[in-house]
Amino acid sequence: MRMYRCRLKVLTPMVIGEVRSARGYYTAYEAIPGHTIGGAVNRALFGKSYPPQGNAAKMFIASTAYPVFDNRESFPAHPFYYECKVCDNLIFSTLEKESLLQAIKGGLKDVKDKLVALECDRHHPLKSLHPRPLVHDSAFIKKDRLSVQPFISVGMNRHTASSQYGLLYEYTAIEPGQEYWFTLASTGNIDISEEFEVRIGRGSSRGLGRGLVKVVRKDEGFSFTQHSASEITLYALSPVPLRFLSKPINLKECAARYGLSGVDGSLEILVVEDQLMVFGKVKTMSAGWSFGSPISRNRITCVSAGSVLVCRWREKSSDPLRSMEALRYFGMPLVLDSDPVDGFCMLHTFDGEPIREVR
Ligand SMILES: [Zn+2]
């Protein structure tokens, strides 16, 4: 496995729309989906030999890209992160004090009593920050918003080279200068340039969506906690499609798609009092475009990045540490219309407060 930590710097306004209206695309993502980043990186690095035929050893799998604020990497808030609606800058996670696994042992009532907070110490109402991007390091916790700009594009008439009446598009674009972080992983022995340009999102033929990727470091030598425990708490670094919640997460599918040896076993979500132990918001999202096809894939229903899942080994892995590393950096391939889509179901084990522990 080769894993890299990268930064993307937006050079020209980037339009990564979710919702199409009559006049354009709205809603800039606070995070850029892994399949979008992955497609852009692989096209920049491999040109026409992407996508590779057969298994995916000759390409990179990208994580979701999250914003970087003041040179600090943000992560999606999990559902136990709260903000006081009255007190200034009062942001906290109930997982800092209470263990999720311990609470689960006491049943759903304990989970609710110990982990769901309704008011601060001064009895003000709280709101959950899930899944907003959050910076959490030893010094401070901070939430921030991306700078976006409305962007109006005039349709040009190809024959007269002048603007065309009635062809006016409105977009929300991510402003130049914004940075994101993400990971790249591959099983092939592929060397990567330290710096390269990518094109992401709409309007790249009109100069939009140019970005510069820099490799920050090689990610290696992880000591994941908990990987062989009977119950494992996992933090989602990407959206998790519902199919991975209703059926076991079979790591052999990950091994087969990405050519990974020693990755096996299957995980299932723990059920307590008839409830799946999955904490997070459900949303539908675009699954992008099939390569070379003008038709977008069906939208898929996921729990958001930042969600928390509790799993157990249904079939124990022969190498739990390696399997967990694969789940973190490769995730699970999602097959949509017999077309595999990468960058989903990337999960990181944690003991206490995930955003403090995740790397
Ligand atoms: Zn308060």
Image (cartoon, helix red, strand yellow):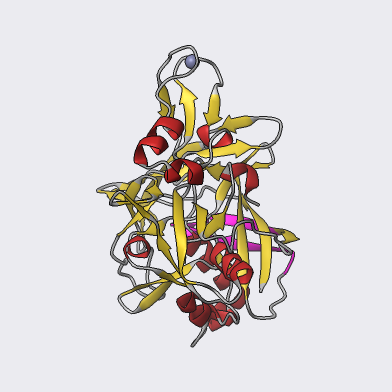
- Front-most of residues 25 and 182: 182
Rendered image quadrant of residue 3: bottom right
Labels in figure, total:
0
On the image, the x and y values in percent for residue 98 come to 53, 36
Magenta stretch, residue numbers: 193-214
Determine if residue 178 is in view.
Answer: no
Q: Is residue 64 magenta?
A: no
- At x 47%, y 57%, the residue is 33
On the image, the x and y values in percent for residue 125 come to 40, 19
In which quadrant will I find the N terminus? bottom right
- Front-most of residues 61 and 36: 61
- At x 39%, y 45%, the residue is 280
Above or below, comparing residue 81 to residue 35 in the picture:
above
- At x 48%, y 11%, the residue is 122
Rendered image quadrant of residue 194: bottom right
- At x 67%, y 58%, the residue is 5
Q: Is residue 22 left or right of residue 307?
A: left
